[in-house]
Image (cartoon, rainbow, N blue to C red):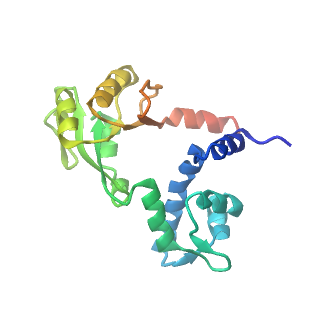
Amino acid sequence: MGMHLEECEEACFMAKGKVSDIIIGRLPIYLRELTYLAEEGREITSSQELGDRLGISSAQIRKDLSHFGEFGKQGTGYHIGFLSEKLREILKVDRVWDVVLVGAGYLGHALANYGGFIGKGFNIVAVFDNDPAKIGQPLGRLIVQDSKDLPKAIKEHGWKIAILAVPASAAQEVTDVLVESGIRAILNYAPVILNVPPGVRVQYIDPVIDLQHMTYYL
């Protein structure tokens, strides 16, 4: 019986001694669920319990975690605090990353005021826009800055992560500026595929694409 596409991709990465991006993509889901368990006052969990809560097989969870070490004992399970700490280290969110937000429209407002970044390893420290009516105006606890000052600010502060909340027509131009200034990771809300050089990571968020994915099954 042939493997599914994701299984084939994982197998190819394993053969090369690398960890598949699909596996990396599941680690934050595990970390989030462990956080919920800790908030419930729990100290120990198992791959079976995590699998039941997440809709992922316990074997898959054990296999994913085994690429990074041994975190549990058979018959005992996982210590939630320890495993959470190790996953934060693996994902490099055992520190706080400064994030620059580009775009102060409706989406930018929502992101700047979103409390979900707190305690998760990220802090939006600046917001930029090119609209004269928005520049200098408060946005949450921040003041909207002129996009013309973006390259200088990135280089001065050493920011590496940006959130892109601009129209699709401006996304590539802004991306070029971000990359040239030193940004190495971009969370892109613009509905367009960005061209970036090797070494720059782009993560796409497009609700329309996700909705179209779901409606296929309706």
In which quadrant of the rendered image does the C terminus lie? Answer: top right
Q: How many marks?
A: 0
Of residues 68 and 216, the one nearer the viewer is: 68
Q: Is residue 168 left or right of residue 144?
A: right
In this picture, residue 113 sits left or right of residue 188: left
> Closest to the observer: 51 or 70?
70
| Residue 55 in view | no
Name the residue at the left extreme. Answer: 136
Residue 172 visible, this orientation: yes
Q: Quadrant of the N terminus?
A: top right
Residue placed at 17% from the left, 39% from the top?
156
When the figure is inspected, residue 151 is found, relative to residue 12, above or below; the finding is above
Residue sitting at x 69%, y 34%: 216
Point out residue 32 in the picture as x, y percentages from the top left corner: 49, 60
**Image coordinates for residue 145, horizontal then vertical, percent:** 17, 35
Q: Residue at x 44, y 26 (%)?
A: 194
Q: Is residue 102 left or right of residue 25?
A: left
Residue occupying image coordinates x 23% and y 42%: 158
Q: Quadrant of residue 116?
A: bottom left
Q: Residue 190: where, in percent of width, then height?
A: 42, 30
Give the vertical position of 24 relative to 143 (above or below): below
Q: Residue furthest front?
A: 16
Q: Which quadrant of the figure has residue 93?
A: bottom left
